[in-house]
């Protein structure tokens, strides 16, 4: 069985950021995550030396790959920004957001072979964002687009379970990770590299580095659209995406009740602050249809997201009801748009997908 000691021993032959100290002794090496033959870790360095430190990252990757039991390796470079001097912070106009990891617009670059990138986000967890992202991607693919999904929720990846995928991604000779495929979609997730039981105890810069690698070192080409399932909240992963790639827009998922809408507003505000277009809001779990009597029950209320969209001036993309079949197909790894395409809930996702596609064209 592959052990951490084996990984650390192999990395002992690689010089750390100072060019002399062995990497495990340099203080730059993160926790090493091992799941079967899959290994992931990050290396912290000075952001101004990113190009120079890439050689160190490659050397670390090669050293670990040389271990017979290792199948895949994910090595990311991360950097922590120094704290902003108090005098500089005081000069910032009131209400103006701090720029994290560089400017909001400067440095945004496309992903080779990907025409559009959209973020599926929410201000909080538990609103069905990942299920929405999976079925929305399938609905967009059914509309004739070449679609991929990036599961950017490093702490709680859901796509392996939602699509019933348990395979391990291969790495090409060009050092690109091959995404797994399901129902015609290209899919990449940290969940393919670690087990479901592994706790990702990573700090913000490490998460940001992992998101960057999953964006730029995966063989996405060619895609019309990359759907990115964001983690809940407004942290490093969201900022990394919004400030490093040219987003075609963001879709906010919320349930109807006021508590969820408060957090949805924060998500909208974050994307506005980094100049990313808001494609619209989806109301998930909009109503519950009883499978026995067919009656409608507004468990979380109804219409709150539509009202909020009108209040803040963004498009309302549609309502997705809560049904037993949606939960059952998701748990079974057979998203409802693929497994029950003629169902009313699959039709609701297709309606939302058409509005999303129209919003991308307008953005």
Image (tube, rainbow, N blue to C red):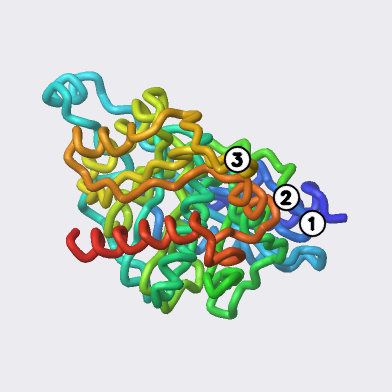
**Residue 195 percent across, percent down from the top left:** 73, 50
Q: Is residue 154 above or below residue 360?
A: above
Looking at the picture, tell me which residue is in the foreground, 330 or 22: 330
Inter-mark Cα distance, 1 to 2: 8 Å
Task: Say if residue 194 shows up in the picture.
Answer: yes
Looking at the picture, tell me which residue is in the foreground, 163 or 110: 163
Q: Quadrant of the N terminus?
A: bottom right
Looking at the picture, tell me which residue is in the foreground, 331 or 248: 331
Q: Quadrant of residue 268?
A: top left
Q: Quadrant of the C terminus?
A: bottom left
- The residue indicated by pointer 1 is 36
**Residue 272 percent across, percent down from the top left:** 22, 41
Residue that protrudes farthest toward the right in the picture: 1
- Relative to 238, is 311 on the left or the right? left
Name the residue located 27 percent from the left edge and 59 percent from the top edge: 248
Disc assigned to residue 293: 3
Discs 1/2, front: 2
* Helix, strand or loop for disc 2: loop
Name the residue located 76 percent from the left edge and 63 percent from the top edge: 70
- Relative to 296, is 274 on the left or the right? left
- The residue indicated by pointer 2 is 195
**Residue 109 percent across, percent down from the top left:** 29, 63
**Residue 81 percent across, percent down from the top left:** 37, 37
């Amino acid at each position: 069985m592959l052990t951490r000691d084996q990984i650390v021993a192999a990395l002992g032959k690689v010089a750390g950021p100072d060019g002399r100290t062995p990497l495990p002794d340099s203080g730059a090496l993160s926790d090493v995550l091992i799941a079967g033959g899959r290994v992931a870790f990050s290396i912290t360095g000075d952001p101004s030396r990113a190009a120079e430190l890439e050689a160190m990252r490659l050397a670390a990757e090669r050293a670990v790959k040389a271990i017979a039991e290792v199948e895949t390796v994910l090595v990311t470079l991360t950097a922590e920004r120094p704290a902003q001097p108090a005098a500089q912070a005081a000069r910032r106009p009131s209400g103006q957001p701090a720029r994290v990891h560089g400017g909001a617009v400067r440095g945004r670059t496309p992903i080779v072979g990907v025409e559009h990138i959209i973020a599926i986000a929410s201000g909080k967890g538990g609103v069905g964002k990942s299920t929405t992202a999976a079925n929305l991607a399938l609905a967009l693919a059914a509309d004739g687009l070449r679609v991929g999904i990036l599961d950017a929720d490093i702490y709680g990846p859901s796509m392996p379970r939602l699509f019933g995928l348990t395979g391990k991604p291969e790495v090409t000779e060009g050092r690109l990770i091959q995404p797994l495929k399901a129902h015609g979609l290209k899919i990449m997730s940290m969940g393919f590299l670690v087990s479901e039981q592994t706790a990702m105890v990573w700090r913000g810069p490490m998460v940001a580095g992992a998101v960057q690698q999953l964006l730029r070192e995966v063989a996405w080409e060619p895609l019309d659209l990359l759907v990115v399932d964001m983690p809940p909240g407004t942290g490093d992963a969201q900022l990394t995406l919004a400030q490093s790639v040219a987003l075609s827009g963001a879709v906010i998922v919320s349930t109807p009740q006021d508590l969820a809408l408060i957090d949805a507003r924060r998500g909208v505000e974050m994307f506005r602050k980094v100049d990313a277009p808001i494609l619209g809001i989806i109301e998930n779990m909009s109503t519950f249809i009883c499978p026995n009597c067919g009656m409608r029950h507004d468990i979380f209320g109804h219409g709150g997201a539509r009202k909020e969209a009108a209040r803040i001036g963004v498009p309302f993309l549609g309502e997705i009801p809560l049904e037993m079949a949606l939960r059952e197909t998701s748990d079974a790894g057979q998203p409802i748009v693929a497994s029950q395409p003629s169902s009313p809930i699959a039709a609701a996702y297709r309606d939302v997908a058409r509005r999303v596609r129209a919003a991308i064209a307008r953005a």
